[in-house]
Amino acid sequence: MLIVGTDAAAVEIELTSGQLSCLDCQAKLRPWGHAIERDVRGPGAVIERRRPRRSICRSCATTHVLLAEDTLARRRDSAEVIGTALLGKAMGRGRRSIAAALGVHPSTVAGWLRRFALMAGAVREHFTRWAAVLGPGHGAFCPTGSAFTDAVEAIGVVGIVAVRRFGPRPVWSLASVLTGGGLLATRAHPYPPPV
């Protein structure tokens, strides 16, 4: 899986002109059909039908699904919706009130919160490294006593540092990019290291 921009036409141009590279061997990718069409629920419970593009490496023949940066791997809901739930939990709200505000079933929100809680230490560590890379002069984090809240804060700090350096960008899309779409991944430590 390769995280790409949200403009399908621009992604298609990048793919066909050889601007996208294989994650395994860095060779150029070429078009290779599409992945299964799926629904993505965005803010306001608006459902958008998407069919992600697939690519294949010219050298090693590895296939990659091109996942838009506003989504997460294996999740039906957009990164912004899931991020809003994580932020709500960090602010002390319960899963039922978060679910009601987002128009999502409480068990879905509970699953996100449970997965993020399991990954919170790795998430905090990963985003702390990114904050140091993107904004070396940025001050130290202030631990809150909650691994969950510290992880959400680390994502927010990277968002602030990235805005200062590169300009406005949705923080949860950035979180998707910096984790390779795996913010809520099931592997122990799926995140690509800072460059």
Image (tube, rainbow, N blue to C red):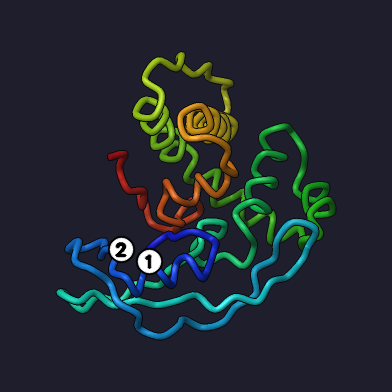
Sooner in the amino-acid sequence: mark 1 or mark 2: 1
Q: Which mark is residue 150?
A: none
x, y (%) of residue 52? Answer: 50, 75
Work out whether residue 114 or residue 142 is closer to the camera in this orientation and state it. 142
Cα distance between the residues tagged 1 and 2: 5 Å
Quadrant position of the C terminus in the picture:
top left
Q: Secondary structure at mark 1?
A: helix
Circle 1 crowding by C-alpha within 10 Å: few under 14, some 14–19, many from 20: some
Residue at label 2?
19
Type of the residue with mark 2: Gln
| Residue drawn where x is 31% and y is 39% of the image | 194
For the image shown, how many numbered marks are present on the structure?
2
| Residue drawn where x is 51% and y is 83% of the image | 36
Q: Quadrant of residue 133?
A: top left
Mark 1 and mark 2 residues within 8 Å of each other at the beta carbon: yes
Residue at label 1?
14
Figure check: 142 above or below 33: above
